[in-house]
Image: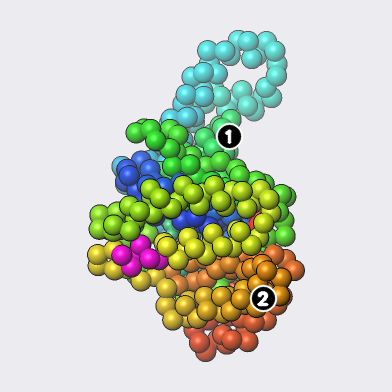
Amino acid sequence: MVYQATASAPVNIACIKYWGKRDTKLILPTNSSLSVTLSQDHLRSTTTSRADPSFSKDRLWLNGKEEEIVAPGRLATCIAELKKLRKELVEDKDESAPKVIADSILPLFALLKMIIQLSTVPVHIASFNNFPTAAGLASSASGFAALVSSLAALYALPCSPSTLSLIARQGSGSACRSLFGGYVAWEQGVLDDGSDSLAVEVAPRSHWPEMHALICVVSDDKKGTSSTSGMQRTVQTSELLQHRIKHVVPKRMKEIEAAIKAKDFDAFAKVTMADSNQFHAVALDTEPPIFYMNDVSRSIIALIVEYNRVAIEKTGKRKAAYTYDAGPNAVIYTLQENVKEIVELIVKYFPQKDGFKDPFQLFAGGSVG
Ligand code: DP6
């Protein structure tokens, strides 16, 4: 018998950045972070997992290209963790099987699934992104979240998104936040085994549906320094990072959660831009320094700063927030009412010859997912 399940997960873009690990194997961060999950329509990974006794081993294809699953690597760890949960589930169910059958509360197919030792059957996993991989667009976040969700569905695991986030985190730190839509915090946790380092929902999408993200693809080339290696170089060499971890992020986490809860865009924008700036400052404070933004990225910052200056003059409030991950692409958060104005401004000041790959054809302003 063959079992198969498909799941999708969207990209999330951090407002308070995760940068640095205290445990590189378990992927435990040096600070908490907070992100907004984008809508499924624009940037997502879709993963199908299939278990079949005729398969000889676990295999994975990413956008049609096979990736090796090497233990104890990240992929192998995630798959092993989910198989472990499946095994525990079946063992638990076996113990209570007579009661379950007597109550007849499970449909026949679920009973069959329980009986078969699915956790020992090899899986084939195929994952597709609808956007370029490794372009600083957090493909690993949506990729590992979709992989974990599809295996959890295949194994019929009755787990909450926070529980699954513990596993997705071991694939890629930022992936744990893509298990939820809307506004999501990754609580760094204090325990050595990582069991309290998980994602929690701060607010659902429906709380603030006017929020939009414009993704400006400055370059979709593979980035120079990966997040994984870049952040560990920062941990080893940056004094500014220690200041950030102790004195800056805890305060900002509180501020941004309050801003989201109160739907205070001005406060949200102020903290988001400050945190993007500081993340790039710690990258620069790394030895040797890491530069993720380019001239086009910096010009977009200048444009948003000027746009906000005019808005503050008129209304006392900011109307847009830029943020940059480990690459040159800009994400601009704004409210629905300003999307058109900002798109027109960017198209006016950044025609394609300046390095843009027609961002709005690729990724039109996605709403929060
Ligand atoms: C700048 O999650 O890609 O996007 O845990 O090593 O896989 P690993 O790193 P990753 O780092 C993301 C860094 C960031 C900030 C963020 O998303 O919070």
In screen coordinates, is 79 left or right of 108?
left
Q: Is mark 2 within 8 Å of ligand 1?
A: no
Depth check: 255 or 11 in front? 255
Residue 203 in view in this figure: yes
In screen coordinates, is 78 left or right of 165?
left
- Mark 1 and mark 2: Cα distance apart in space: 46 Å
In screen coordinates, is 137 left or right of 180?
left
Q: Is mark 1 within 8 Å of ligand 1?
A: no
Residues rendered magenta in the picture: 280-285
Residue pictured at 38% horizontal, 48% vertical: 246
Mark 1 — residue? 160
Depth check: 152 or 53 in front? 152
Give the answer, above or below, for where 279 lies relative to 188: below
Quadrant for residue 285, please give it: bottom left
Q: Main secondary structure of the magenta part?
A: helix
Residue pictured at 24% horizontal, 64% vertical: 287
Label 2 environment density (alpha carbons within 10 Å; few <14, some 14–19, many ≥20): few
Mark 2 — residue? 313
Is 258 a magenta residue?
A: no
Tell me where residue 341 appears, x and y as whole percent: 70, 77
Locate ligand 1 by image quadrant.
Answer: bottom left
Looking at the picture, which amino acid does disc 2 mark? Glu
Looking at the picture, which amino acid does disc 1 mark? Ser
Depth check: 32 or 172 in front? 32
